Image (spheres, rainbow, N blue to C red):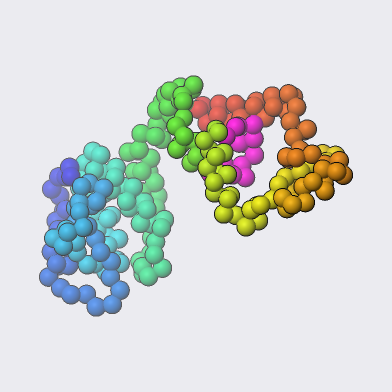
Amino acid sequence: METFNNKYKTWHDNIIANGKKRILIGYKEKHHILPRCLGGDNSKENLVALTPKEHFIIHMLLCKFTLGKSRIKMLYAFHAMIYFTKKNRNYKVTSRIVEKLKIEFQKNNPVFDPEVRRKIGIGNKGKIVSKESRLKMSKARMGNKNALGLRHTEEFKERIRNINKGNKTALGRKHINKDGKSKMVNANEVDKYLNQGYKLGMDKSYITLEYRKHQSDMAKAYWDRRAA
């Protein structure tokens, strides 16, 4: 961990030392003296029990005497502590602290640099996305109209098919369509519906070349905005 000595480090060390000497009664929180994101482990020597207020102050102090990448990671940790607080924590986060945190967070995070964002956008153009990344992106876009026109890979489709094998709603049922409408029926009823003019599968008559082009243009415009 990259650090320098100042009054904040002294305060930090004093809180840790006091925490090591006592036994807390009631609600308490475990703190990693050397944070896990900086290589700390779950050993007894690296853990100390703190009150919620002390835990909050410790993470705030860590942002004041760390350097380089260590400082950025501590800012992330403090950010998470503020925005994902536990109900048992009894401290209050003032607007001054939040403002200072956001300014420091953006100043030290290269992703917020416009030039870095521009380079990331250029670098991602034409980039082949892994199957795992596609899966994560697909989950994130569920219900997002900006994802219309994007296609799933065959590997992803196979995963969904395997997941749905245990779905009681879809298990043993088939899609059929007629006059532009689709529905699902039990497998033993398929022949009956086929005799009534239905076809197997979902209706896809609305997917014309114009429709595909429109959806593709929407997707391209979205990613162009993201890269800008």
Q: Tell me the magenta residue range.
A: 138-152
**Image: 218 above or below 58:** above
Decide if residue 152 is on the left or right side of residue 4: right
Counting from the top left corner in percent of width and height, residue 180 is at: 82, 39
Above or below, 115 relative to 163: above
Res. 94 in view: no
Q: Position of residue 65 (x, y in %)?
A: 20, 48
State whether residue 33 is above or below residue 225: below
Asked if residue 75 lies in the magenta stretch, the reply is no
**154 relative position to 71: left or right:** right
Q: Nearer the viewer, residue 187 or 132?
A: 187
Residue 212 visible in the displayed image? yes
Give me the residue at 37% from left, 53% from top: 80
Query: What's the residue at 86%, 41% (across, down)?
Result: 197
Q: Quadrant of residue 217?
A: top right
The total of numbered circles placed on residues is: 0
Specify the farthest residue to the right. Answer: 196
Does residue 24 appear left or right of residue 96 in this picture? left
The overriding secondary structure of the stretch rendered in magenta is: loop
Classify the position of the N terminus by image quarter: top left
Q: Is residue 151 magenta?
A: yes
Residue 137 is situated, as x and y percent measured from the top left of the image, at 51, 39
Along the line of sight, the residue nearer the viewer: 181 or 110: 181
